[in-house]
Image (cartoon, helix red, strand yellow):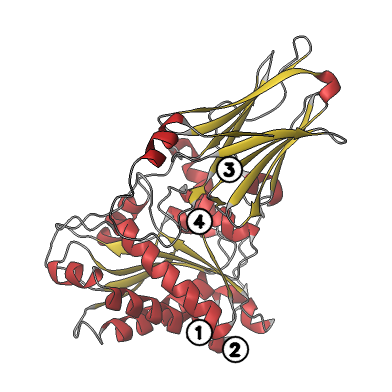
Amino acid sequence: MRTIVAPALLAALALPLAAGPPQDDPRIEIVNLRRSTHPNFTRVVLDIGTLREYTFGELRDPGRIYVDVLQAKLNPILQGQAYPVQADYVSQIRIAQKTVSTVRLVVDVDFLRIQSYRVFHLFDPYRLVVDIYPHGPQAPATMAPAGKVAQPGERTQPAVQRKVDPDDPNFKGTSMARQLGLGVRTVVIDPGHGGAKPGTIGRSGLQEKEINLAVALSLKKLLEDRSGIEAVLTRESDVDVGLDDRTVIANQKRADLFVSIHANAHRDRRRGGVETFFLNISPDPSVIELAAVENATSTKNVGQMRSILEKIVQNSKIQESKKLAEAIQTNLVKSLSRDLPGIPNLGVKGGPFWVLIGGEMPSVLVEISHLSNAREEAKLKTKTYRDLAAQGIYDGIMEYIHSLGKG
């Protein structure tokens, strides 16, 4: 086994510790694994983004090449994933959280068919690379193209074909969830934006991604400590998670609810308040404008519009999503009013938000306040206000659960 310390890291260790705010979690969050096969070698790339020490080695019977990344944690999109490879010298690639602070990447190989391999790092951005060279040229395997982000949800969660029945109780009085007496055990909380995509930025420089994560972490603690509900975050640090991947995480975790947390913005800086959305088509110009902003990072193209619209129309969770949105909206306004009396209640609305499209459970997007409004931006800077936002969302979730006859 070999331990590699990047040169820049050695230089950093030689410097005295600079004064600064303590970090609650020094681990970097890993969100992306790429792989590609070429005629003469297979390459695996682990995108890390921040300098980290790593070790690597090999194991026999069965053959494995492993890389351990220290002071790291896996985003749920990658946790425990295995990627099959159609090559006679590499069978699959696996990644998992080995310990609390170590992420292990494993490539299952046949050493009798391998001539050599190498493990190394690259900068800008920082990433680890594993190149594996077989004996003689190989035909390219059927794999994702180089640079394409792995989509584990596509392998483990086949698309569910839904057809809309006009008599479906989901669209009438009592939903199927209530008829079947279904409860809530797992909630996926989605802190909007992150990494190089900060979302809205206030005049003071306050970034939406920071607010969203703080509220999400507080909400997770409330759900786990007070109700025993499992709460999973789509990101636990300042990383960029793709819009598609956020609901993939929820589907993989078989979540019962999906709540995406955001801070709003408007061209009219006098506008403020709280609003909550569920997935639907909307003719409202203000909703369309907001959806365009939130969907700006989507990688989908116009040619996919028909299938996207069908997903929205065929979403059988509309009624339950609306009820969840109403419960959260009411309780969020009530909670925030304790610190900001008179905060406007902008209501519950349907909207075509991409982050809600892929979820197979009741899903909502919460705009907790306006960063573009000076009074609300000042409040969003404070821990008190953020905790009240988390409390309001928590109360709304619990009210929704009670309405199911549970909890």
Q: Is residue 346 visible?
A: no
Q: Earlier in the sequence, mark 1 or mark 3?
A: 3
Of labels 4 and 1, the one closer to you: 1
**Of residues 90 and 182, the one drawn nearer to the viewer in this rendering:** 90
Q: Amino acid at mark 1?
A: Met
Q: Earlier in the sequence, mark 2 or mark 4?
A: 4
Mark 4 vs mark 1, CA separation in Å: 23 Å
* Left or right side of 26 for 113: right
* Left or right side of 194 for 184: right
Residue 196, quarter of picture: top left
The residue drawn where x is 58% and y is 28% is 129
Q: Is residue 332 visible?
A: yes
Q: Cβ–Cβ below 8 Å for labels 1 and 2?
A: yes
Mark 2 vs mark 3, CA separation in Å: 41 Å
- Packing grade of label 3 (10 A; few <14, some 14-19, many >=20) is many
Of labels 2 and 4, the one closer to you: 2
Asked which secondary structure carries label 3, the reply is strand
The residue drawn where x is 32% and y is 73% is 386
- Mark linked to residue 19: none
Q: Is residue 357 above or below residue 39?
A: below
Q: Which residue is mark 1?
A: 398
